[in-house]
Image (tube, rainbow, N blue to C red):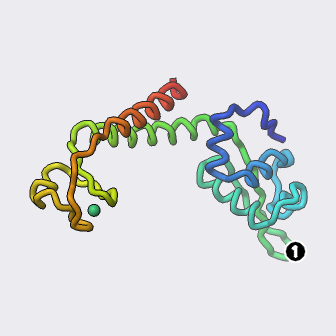
């Protein structure tokens, strides 16, 4: 069984995004060793669909593996699952680096460009706004210069938070 208290808040937040509260409940009540999805459903009291969905997402994220075993008499295949969250910090780090990279790109884009915006909230780059005589391409309303300072501040803050976690 995984002790949820040993997982820090960042990891719990990440797991929550990945598999949701129900998924976390499944994961934190898993029996040791290899186990079938039916058995997990029985033990955790979760719906079989929730269990399968959780296992599949974890598998996709390299946090679970399965082994197929054929019953010699019936010929039926049994899937034996094993959840291993030891790599979760690594998986989380890779995800956060990806996110950080995307945010950095967005930040540079916001810093390097001048934006115009209409009353409906459609944004336009300066060059395009000039070409259209400062009329919105989407709705035809007048475009005004947009101060994106607050957005830049928010992006900087988010990047800073992620960098602080990544260390
Ligand atoms: Zn518009």
Q: 128 or 92: nearer the eye? A: 128
Which of the 4 image quarters holds residue 69? bottom right
Q: Residue at x 64, y 41 (%)?
A: 13
Q: Residue at x 73, y 63 (%)?
A: 52
Q: Residue at x 57, y 36 (%)?
A: 90
Which of the 4 image quarters holds residue 109? top left
Percent across and percent down for residue 152 are 35, 36
Instruction: Say if 16 sits above or below 120 in the image.
Output: above
Q: Residue at x 50, y 32 (%)?
A: 162
Does label 1 point to a residue whose CB lies under 8 Å from ligand 1? no
Residue 76 in the figure: left or right of residue 99: right
Q: Callout 1: 10 Å neighbours few (<14), some, many (20+)? A: few
Q: 103 or 88: nearer the eye? A: 103
Quarter of the figure with the N terminus: top right
Percent across and percent down for residue 66 are 71, 56
Instruction: Say if 136 sits above or below 113 in the image.
Output: below
Q: 65 or 140: nearer the eye? A: 140
Q: How many marks?
A: 1
Residue 108 in the figure: left or right of residue 4: left
Percent across and percent down for residue 70 are 79, 68
Percent across and percent down for residue 73 are 87, 74
Can you identify the residue that label 1 sits on? 73
């Amino acid at each position: 069984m995984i002790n949820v208290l040993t997982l820090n808040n960042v990891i719990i937040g990440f797991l929550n995004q990945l598999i949701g509260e129900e998924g976390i409940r499944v994961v934190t009540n898993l029996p040791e060793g290899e186990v079938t999805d039916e058995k997990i459903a029985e033990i955790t009291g979760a719906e079989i669909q929730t269990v399968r969905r959780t296992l599949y997402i974890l598998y996709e994220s390299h946090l679970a593996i399965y082994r197929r075993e054929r019953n010699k008499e019936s010929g039926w295949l049994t899937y034996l699952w094993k959840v291993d969250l030891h790599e979760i910090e690594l998986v989380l780090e890779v995800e956060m680096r990806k996110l950080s990279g995307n945010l950095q790109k967005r930040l540079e884009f916001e810093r390097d460009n001048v934006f115009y915006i209409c009353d409906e909230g459609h944004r336009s780059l300066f060059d395009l706004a000039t070409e259209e005589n400062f009329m919105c391409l989407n709705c035809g309303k007048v475009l005004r210069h947009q101060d994106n300072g607050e957005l830049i501040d928010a992006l900087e803050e988010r990047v800073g938070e992620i960098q602080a976690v990544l260390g």
